[in-house]
Image (tube, grey):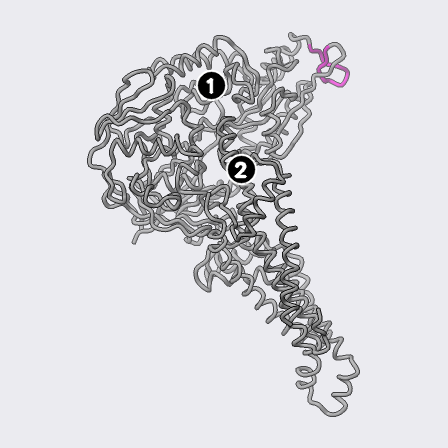
Amino acid sequence: MRTLTIVRPTDPVSLDPNLETTAPGAWVYFNMLEGLLTLDEKMQVKPALATSYEVMSPTKVRFKLRPGVKFHDGTPFNAAAVKFTFDRALRGTPPARWASLAGSLDGAEVVDDLTVDVVTKEPYGPILRTLAMYCMGMVSPTAVQKMGADFSRAPVGTGPFKFVEWKTNTHVIIERNNDYWGDKALVDRVIFKVVPEEGARMIALQTGDADMVLFPSPAQLPALRKDSKFTVHETTGIRVVFAGLHAGLPPLDDVRVRQALLHAVDRKAILDNIMEGSAGPARGVLAPGVFGYKDMQLDRLYPFDKARAKALLGQAGWTPGPDGMMTKGGQRLSLSWLAARGRYPKDGEITEAIQAMFKEVGVEARVQVLEWAAVFQQVRANPLNHHMFTLGWVTSNADADYSLYALFHSKQVPPTGWNTSRYANARVDTLVEQARRSLNQTEREKLYAEVQDIIAKEMVWIPVYTTKEIVVTRAGVKGFQVHPVEYNLALWKTWLER
Amino acid sequence: MLTFVVRRLLLAVPVLLGVVFVVMLTIDLLPGDAVTLMLGEHATKDAVAVLREHLGLDKPFAVRYLDYVTRLARGDLGRSIQQNRPVARELADAWPATLQLTIAALLIAAGVGIVAGIVSAVWPNSVFDAIARLASLFGLSMPIFWTGLVLIVVFSLWLNWLPVGGAGSLSHLVLPAVTLALPSVAMVSRMTRSAVLDVLGEDYVRTARAKGVGEPWVLGKHALRNAFIPILTLLGLQSGQLMGGAVLTETVFAWPGLGRLMVKAIFARDYVLLQGAVLVFALAFVVINLLVDLSYGLLDPRVGRQG
């Protein structure tokens, strides 16, 4: 029997997307449950259980379903199953954990056995990418009704693998679904083992106890890349880590000061010396894989240039004092900065590096390093009394709406949304609203491009890096491709070379 | 005897109530809450409110404490907040692994520790004694996660004799049990050495030797039996230590026990699950202490049983 053994740090919370949207569960159920659509490795929407779709009205999209598909328990997959899955998730008490991610999605209506209408509460442009999310897998209605609460530990879907066994805190085993409608999986079984200790995970790979390591130790990657016994699979992820600027709090309300700060930061030095190849450059406020992404050309607009930074500060009325620090009317240019350590890769280190770079141009940063929960609480508060904050943002549904609307619309100031920068631009508000309500994807792409052009001129972030998704395997593991969305761990094309 | 046992068990009730209170308060005072952790940072305000209400987390602390205790009195440990699974089932899955690990470590600690201690006491200041002293210092000073990783590197990576981690067979048990036992082996051997040396200096041992009793008999019948009381007390205390150490050992060796369950519950701020796990530990402490007290009577008839 060909078995693929995977080690990862934690046991799932649940194998039911209704109860678990985080990686430990998603890695497993993504291989058992399929949605109507899926996102391929190039972040393009591809058909899965739906074969085609047609936009019926701004709030209704009609899907033709794949005929002849059966759930692992033999239940036929049809329009009623789609309706059942969405009703269970959106009308349950409490609603599914992913309900917040699904925006305006309201449910499904059965048209005939193999035709279903997906309905939204209001016109909702991101609907396709929402349905393609890893957590939108269809569940067998008969299995849910028969198993009750136990379903969450042994889910029944239509995917290329089916559930075998879950021993809490030890392993989850899944096996090939021989009745799969598409290309069948190439390995017989996959075992997901829990190995919490990072060092022990890497040793398991070296002794051959494991074929694949999720969350590998970053410190060992340079050595592993050179070792022919292993393959390091990596791709740019969808999280951007940035130093946020509070545009509503003087002196950062002056765009010249914000631009000066961007010029003051040597982003390449941070990538080379702190991230050491474990992250990609941030080319804007979105990651490259996200629908609507536009390269903001930050290196051209804001090259690292201390003289230009000082000149811009000069234009804003700041002059160097006797100690070299910028002052205006007897006030020093001093910024208070909220940061956690360990929430995002190297967040503490990059905060310190930028603090030192600011000092070079006469700007003082008073960094307060707090526990993540405390930082989270403070940046979610209104008003926010800090000039800066180190944060990361994942565009969960891979659609620009998820970030550009929640982060830059003037009405999305916390606690409603995540506009922690208090950015306000009437034109941006209009554009993101329009893009959210349009179902014409070409038009949306244009609208988002304009939004990013405007934001690029008025930067309220110092984007620092885009995360990388990294998986290490033995060299004999072939056919595996790491996905920009960490949850989408597709294992059915993976095979083992003797 | 029976009244003694019953009384001690009844005394455990206020102890457990106190434990429940402290655990609940600690989780309450920690920053971060279960619902935000479950729904993620991007969750809407409404979604958070709905789930909090559903889980009863919106109620005041005192109400939640009383709710929990009332249910506990009926033998209901509740459902875990994060997984919505009966806590009793989670515990049933995990406790045998921890018990197995703790007992194995205790046997190693007692076996190796007592033998090494006796040898050191019979030949004090010998080469063996010096080595044992040095080894004890090492065993006591090295943190479990470090010793554990070193053992993995040597026995799994280099020699390829034993698996890296996980559970299933006896070979899986060796490394974690040895790692967990090391500090206790050190404590027990030191304690045995001084206890036996103490007894060997007593008048009745001199008398025994004077009347011509053979040395093995002196050691076995007179010295050890009396030296055993402090050793047993220490072993009782050590079994508590071992359960605490299991949290780290289980993490290093991916051992699916209560320690890991507890860590998981703390990270998820899942107070219901944490309560269950801590209660099992607390109960184990109470029972072990009781057993130790009872065994004093067996070893030393002078120890009264009036409690």
Kind of residue sitting beneath label 1: Leu
- Residue B195: where, in percent of width, then height? 72, 73
In terms of depth relative to the viewer, which is nearer, A126 or A471?
Answer: A126
Q: Look at the picture and state if B15 lies above or below A292.
A: below
Residue A149 picture location, percent across and down: 40, 44
Is B116 left, or right, of A494 in this rendering? right
Chain of the residue that carries numbered disc 2 in the rendered image = B
Identify which amino acid the numbered label 2 is placed on.
Answer: Gly
Residue B166 at x, y = what percent?
Answer: 46, 55
Labels 1, 2: front one: 2
Q: Decide which of A223, A398 is in the foreground and name it.
A: A398
Marks 1 & 2 on one chain: no
Q: Chain of mark 1?
A: A
Image coordinates of residue B251 in percent, x first then y, are 53, 51
B27 left or right, relative to B90 = right
Mark 1 residue element: helix
- Check the image and name the residue furthest to the left: A68
At label 1, counting other C-alpha atoms closer than 10 Å, the crowd grade (few under 14, some 14-19, many 20 or more) is many
- Mark 1 — residue? A404
Which numbered disc covers residue B56? Answer: 2
Residue A68 visible somewhere in the drawing: yes
CB contact under 8 Å: marks 1 and 2 = no
Label 2 Cα crowd, 10 Å radius (few <14 / some 14-19 / many 20+): some
From what the image shows, is residue B78 above or below residue A19? below
Residue at mark 1 to residue at mark 2: CA–CA distance: 34 Å
Q: Which residues are magenta?
A: A318-328
